[in-house]
Image: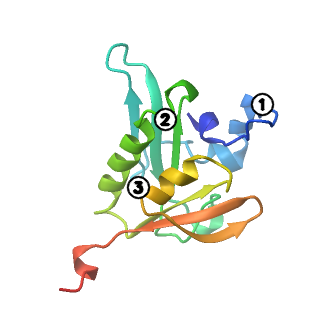
Amino acid sequence: MLYLALYVPPDATPLPREVIYQPELAKYVKDWGQPDDIGFIAMLKDSQMPVGAAWLRLFKSSNKGFGYVNDETPELTIAVLPDYRGHGIGSQLLTQLVETAQPCYSAVSLSVSPDNPALRLYRRFGFEVIGQGGNSLTLTKTFISPKNHIY
């Protein structure tokens, strides 16, 4: 799924699959199952074939990811198989991930290309652009926790 999370514009040459072994990408899945890792897999009911995944991983300033904000904000990664995009799977995965992350974190972040169609999904979920670097935007979704809510 990591390979599918990489956005390649429709008119561009696909990246070689080996790109996921580069350290700056591999760290998003390497040694999965750390205490702060959260993730979900979407599977077809009939065949149990995985068709999508969404996960969060916390990075430190010494090992920043592409959507790094700070040491307390995990980065979100999401991917859906091309034949299953546009059917609500990404929305379901993102809903589950956000609901699970909200009690644990004050925000989540991600990095996305401005021309990636997924940007519309992120905006619909309340992600806001907080920065731009190169050909990517950094977005965050901030959670309102009961302790920060004014009554």
Question: In front: 78, or 37?
Answer: 78
Q: Quadrant of residue 22?
A: top right
**Where does the image place residue 49, in percent across and percent down from the top left?**
43, 19
Residue drawn 55% across the image and 42% down it: 29
Q: From the viewer's perspective, is 133 left or right of 58?
A: right
Disc 1, disc 2: CB below 8 Å? no
Residue drawn 27% across the image and 73% down it: 145
**Where does the image place residue 67, in percent across and percent down from the top left?**
60, 61
Cα distance, mark 2 to mark 3? Answer: 29 Å
**Where does the image place residue 118, in percent across and percent down from the top left?**
56, 47
Q: Which residue is mark 3?
A: 36
Label 3 SS: loop
- Of mark 2 and mark 3, the one earlier in the sequence is 3
Q: Which mark is residue 16?
A: 1
Which corner quadrant holds the N terminus?
A: top right
Question: In front: 28, or 94?
Answer: 94
User: What's the amino acid at mark 3?
Assistant: Asp
Label 2 SS: loop
Question: In front: 39, or 61?
Answer: 39
Residue drawn 57% across the image and 42% down it: 30
Label 1 SS: loop
Q: Which residue is mark 2?
A: 86
Q: From the viewer's perspective, is 41 left or right of 25?
A: left
Cα distance, mark 1 to mark 2? Answer: 25 Å
